[in-house]
Amino acid sequence: MSAATEPALAKPKPEDEEGHSHAVPLRVLAAVWGTLVILTWITISATRMDLGSFNIVIALTIAVVKSAYVVLYFMHLRYDRPFNAVILISAIAFVALFIGFLLMDTKGYQPNVIPGYAPEIEASRSAASH
């Protein structure tokens, strides 16, 4: 076969490549890092306030947002197919939801698991028995 009769080799498209990389601007990475630092500060500040069972909701919501930022920007999922990002963030949110339900359920039996954990309950029980 001559060069004129050979089929032309298809040049691969950039999105078809397996080992592609993304050059993310430093300002984007710095902004994401700053956002993660601020969210960490908010998490620490929220632990100093007593909001009851709402503390768990705040902590898990911030954890989901922080993990989404890490996965989307530092693991470059933001530049992949959008469906992959939606699936991963949904999975993280469902894990946080399940952990939240689990932790809300522990409130009912926590004083019985750790003796002395809830002194006001034990004090009211001992006062009622006298």
Image (spheres, grey):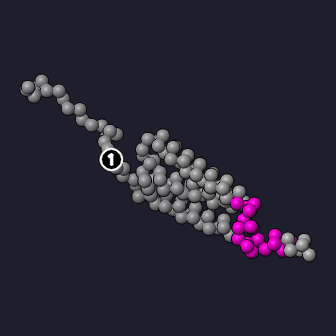
The region drawn magenta spans 106-124
Q: Residue reaching furthest top?
A: 5
Q: Residue at x 49, y 45 (%)?
A: 85
Q: Residue at x 30, y 37 (%)?
A: 13
Q: Nearer the viewer, residue 119 or 29?
A: 119
Q: Is residue 116 magenta?
A: yes
Q: Residues within 10 Å of mark 1 (few under 14, many from 20)?
A: few
Q: How many marks?
A: 1
Q: Residue 12: image x %, image y %?
A: 27, 37
Q: Nearer the viewer, residue 129 or 97?
A: 129
Q: Is residue 88 left or right of residue 11?
A: right
Q: Main secondary structure of the magenta part?
A: helix
Q: Residue at x 55, y 51 (%)?
A: 92
The amino acid type, in three-letter code, at marker 1 is: His
Q: Nearer the viewer, residue 98 or 59?
A: 98
Quadrant including the C terminus: bottom right
Q: Is residue 68 magenta?
A: no
Q: Is residue 58 left or right of residue 119?
A: left
Please determine whether, in this image, residue 13 is positioned above or below residue 119: above
Q: Residue 117: image x %, image y %?
A: 73, 72
